[in-house]
Amino acid sequence: MPNIEIAGKQVEVDEDGYMINLEDWNKDIAVAMAKGDGVELSDSHWEIINFLRDYYQKYQIAPMIKILVKEVGKVMGPDKGNTKYLYELFPDGPAKQACRYAGLPKPTGCV
Amino acid sequence: MAKFSAKPDELAKIRYAPPETEWMETPVEFREHMFCHAAKPKDLETVEFPNAHEWSSKDEDWKLPANWEQTILQGMKDLLGKYRSFQLFMDICVRCGACADKCHFFIGSGDPKNMPVLRAELLRSVYRGNFTLAGKILRKLAGARELTVSVLKEWWYYFYQCTECRRCSVFCPYGIDTAEITMMGRELTNMIGLQLGWIGGPVANCYMKGNHLGLEPHTIKSSIEFFLDDIESITGIKIEPTFNRKGAEILFVTPSGDLFANPGTYTAMGYLMLFHELGLDYTWSTYASEGGNFGFFTSNEMAKRLNSKIYAEAKRLGVKWVLGGECGHMWRVINQYMDTWNGPADFMEVPKSPITGTVFDNAKSTKMVHIAEFTADLIKHNKLKLDPRRNDHLKVTFHDSCNTSRGMGLLEEPRYVIKSVCSHFYEMPENTIREKTFCCGSGTGLNASENMELRMRGGFPRANAVKYVHERHGVNMLANVCAIDRATLSASMDYWVPGVGVAGVHELVGNALIMKGEKERTQDLRLEPLPGKEGSE
């Protein structure tokens, strides 16, 4: 697997840019990855990224989008608990883009 | 890699003119978005697949093991000795061409090497050159050729552009099962460590954790609990299913996609509601937590190993029989292979519906019943209270999965169920359904994201038939009984026929099912307002 330099650190990633080793992750990496996509990470982005990381620690998989939506709705209010809001934050799809910033493996979803 | 961005009207312009050069003189060209990433070595090592190594099909050098030619030729010899079907299919094709235009990948790409006859010829030519007298002496005159790196690359490209759907076989006057040829081709690439990431990962997950997605037991439980919350808010009914319960009458096994990917999750809600309403004595398992079998896309031996987990769990729990969820290739494995791999499962009883008393003699050896048969039988015996009006916002058509239709003849049951729970049902054209159904375009482990052009091309014939009923009858829901379909058809509908959704049959059942003690429903299983109840919540 290729190594790329992100935030001054050599990081092993897969073909689609997802990190191979979760434990190599730090916040600077997320910021640098987002910057590469022209995204400035706001507190709202971080809410999602942190939730993804916590969920992954507990369940060893990225959450389903509907779990994410419900959880965001609970924490941040019903007007934000919808897929539209998540897509505004992560236009490439909250599952794919947010998981990549969070250092999670690429979501498989449907095999 | 640039994102796949071709517009549907560009992709629909398909060139059917073959190249100027003869096929053997036309080397394979790897086009972006038409093939998948290689498997990670650690995943292949998990299941002790040979020659796991780091490589990429985009590189010139595939870092093949030193003796790869001998490995393949010896492997081919072994497979020819082991499977009479393979020997027969290598010998008997008369190249009549009846299969040529029946393949969804050929129709969608115009690439002649996707004609099933020519795809098989990629392998047959090497077979002739090494295993037949005429081929050894007459070489190219007898259609024979050497095994070279270039030939191997061609195999890799085209054996992973076939979904083993077997539509071509329906039209073959000799009954050649072209899927079996692809399966052998894939076994051969697997012997030298060439495997897809999208297949290698799920196989390793299934081997280690019991399911393709790698869901841990507590993840499965939390996912189902999440569905139960939604069911309670829709119906007011609290459901308490059991997990890994010894002594249950029935073990229920479904694809893990139903537990973790939309729209399969709504299908899973339908199962839970139905079983609760029946008071069925059943259990989920977190060990045999996968109905599908991606091992089937690597080698028969691997498929056998993964299949055995379902039966080991049935034995451990002491169930009488197994009820299987909506899946495609799971049923080809069960119906056509399981019996000689891990069967007969004599430690169980011939499946008998505890509700109707119907004995499923068709499953007397495998002891596994498809849920569409089970539910059709319930409806036939008037055991369910149904309100099809709750699906009145849907105009439904049914996509026969390749494996349930051609692999087990399950044609009427899903239709009977759908027509009982929906008021508006329309069939797609006759030559695109039932045993002549078109593949979703992304089965057999090809439902990755990096090969999106291939998937959209392969999905084109099916989508075209959906488009026909969408325009003619306003069809807006494509029902099916397969987890891969639910994932892949969602993508191909968004691309080719926007406005058509995808649903498992038991989602529609769950909507229509009138449950004892339920509150007045205002939402469907997707938490969308029911017809006539808009604005009530």
Image (cartoon, coloured by chain):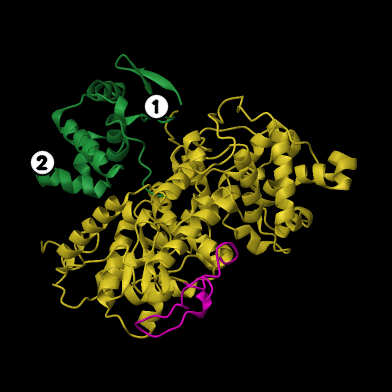
Q: Position of residue A86 (x, y in %)?
A: 21, 40
At label 2, which amino acid type do we have? Met
Using the rendered view, name the quadrant where residue B344 is placed.
bottom right
Q: Is residue B413 above or below residue B196?
A: below
The residue to which callout 1 is attached is A13
Q: Is B24 in front, or is B10?
A: B24
Chain of the residue that carries numbered disc 2 in the rendered image: A
Which chain can be seen in green? A
SS class, disc 2? helix
The magenta stretch spans which residues? B339-367
Task: Tell me whether marks 1 and 2 sit on the same chain.
Answer: yes
From the image, tell me which residue sits under label 2.
A76
Q: Which of marks 2 and 1 precedes in the sequence? A: 1
Q: Residue at x 26, y 74 (%)?
A: B513
Q: Quadrant of the N terminus of chain B?
A: top left
Chain appearing in yellow on the rendered image:
B
Asked if one can make out residue B392 in the rendered structure from this viewpoint, the answer is no
Q: Residues within 10 Å of mark 2 (few under 14, many from 20)?
A: few
